[in-house]
Image: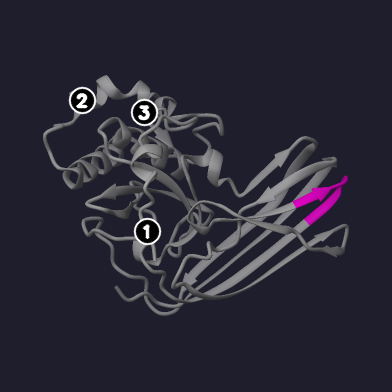
Amino acid sequence: MTTSIRDISATLEVEVTAATVLDMQVAVARVPGLGFEEELRVAVDGLWVTPSEVVGECESRIHRLTLDPGMLTISYSATVSAPADPIPVAATDPTVYLRPSRYAECDKFYGFASRQFDTSRTQAELLTDVTDYVKSRLSYIPGSSDPIDGAADTLLAGAGVCRDYAHLVVALLRALNVPARVVAVYAPGCSPMDFHAVAEALVDGEWVVVDATGLAPRQSLVRIATGRDAADTAFLDNHGGSITLKSYQVFATVRGDLPDDDGTARIRIS
């Protein structure tokens, strides 16, 4: 699969109102094979600071800062010039990504999923069935959900944003015995432009990406963070203290034409 050069950036302004430890996940995951150049600049009250870096699941990179009260500005940019290698399947993946998690509470869906879907179908067929179901069941409405909503809340509401779509896809797949997880990505072509969330499913020994929102071609996605659900992939997470996100902007483009994606091909994040 050929992938165009992708240019991405994110700028954030965060007010720290009480001393805290802050984790950021805005940098491209350093997965094998991915060719990219990047710059991360972080300042507190106009003074440059250097965060520490912690590497997590699928080479997700957490940048951590210990902060006193003040105004934090974050600027990240990257040019991705070469696609990543396929993400290897860890021995623990088929177990970890079948478990219920905070926002993808698959244990609430076992009965519903067994009635709604034909469990005799293959994992690949179930992936298509679940994605199509979530597409048809939900309406994409910004502001229609709360940050604490899980997949069950989303199903009942019938509306949400990208993370809600991803959580419902993941919860239903796990309930059908298909390992699944959430990935935060930069998404050229996404409208409205933002940090984007998609689902990955383990099918026939490889991780493949699905996006029930259909907001961006999957071929152009760039991996940021990977985890059980949005609790693992949030772009900001503070521990103690208090912060207020004052503003942020995200941009992601490809050089040349966006790829066509009718949603039917088996695609991995590259």
* In contact (CB < 8 Å): disc 3 and disc 2: no
Q: Is residue 242 visible?
A: yes
Kindly identify which residue carries mark 2.
114
Kindly identify which residue carries mark 1.
88
Name which residue type carries label 1. Pro
Res. 88 image quadrant = bottom left
User: What mark, if any, has residue 97 been given in the picture?
Assistant: none
Q: Nearer the viewer, residue 142 or 38?
A: 38
Question: Mark 3: which secondary structure?
Answer: helix
Indicate which disc, 2 or 1, sits on the residue closer to the N terminus: 1
Q: Which of 5 and 269 is in front in this view?
A: 269
The residue range painted magenta reads: 65-72
Kindly identify which residue carries mark 3.
106
x and y, in percent, of residue 240 in the image: 77, 35
Q: Can residue 217 be seen in this view?
A: no
Please tell me whether residue 68 belongs to the stretch shown in magenta.
yes
Name which residue type carries label 3. Cys
x and y, in percent, of residue 265 in the image: 22, 59
Q: Quadrant of the N terminus?
A: bottom left
- On the rendered structure, is 68 left or right of 190? right
x and y, in percent, of residue 135 in the image: 29, 42
Res. 169 image quadrant = top left
Residue at (32%, 70%) from the top-left corner?
259
- Rate crowding at label 1 as few (under 14), some (14 to 19) or many (20 or more) other CA atoms within 10 Å: few
- On the rendered structure, is 147 left or right of 172? right
- On the rendered structure, is 115 left or right of 102? left
Name which residue type carries label 2. Ser
Indicate which disc, 3 or 2, sits on the residue closer to the N terminus: 3
Q: Which of 185 and 255 is in front in this view?
A: 185
x and y, in percent, of residue 227 in the image: 48, 45
Res. 76 image quadrant = bottom right
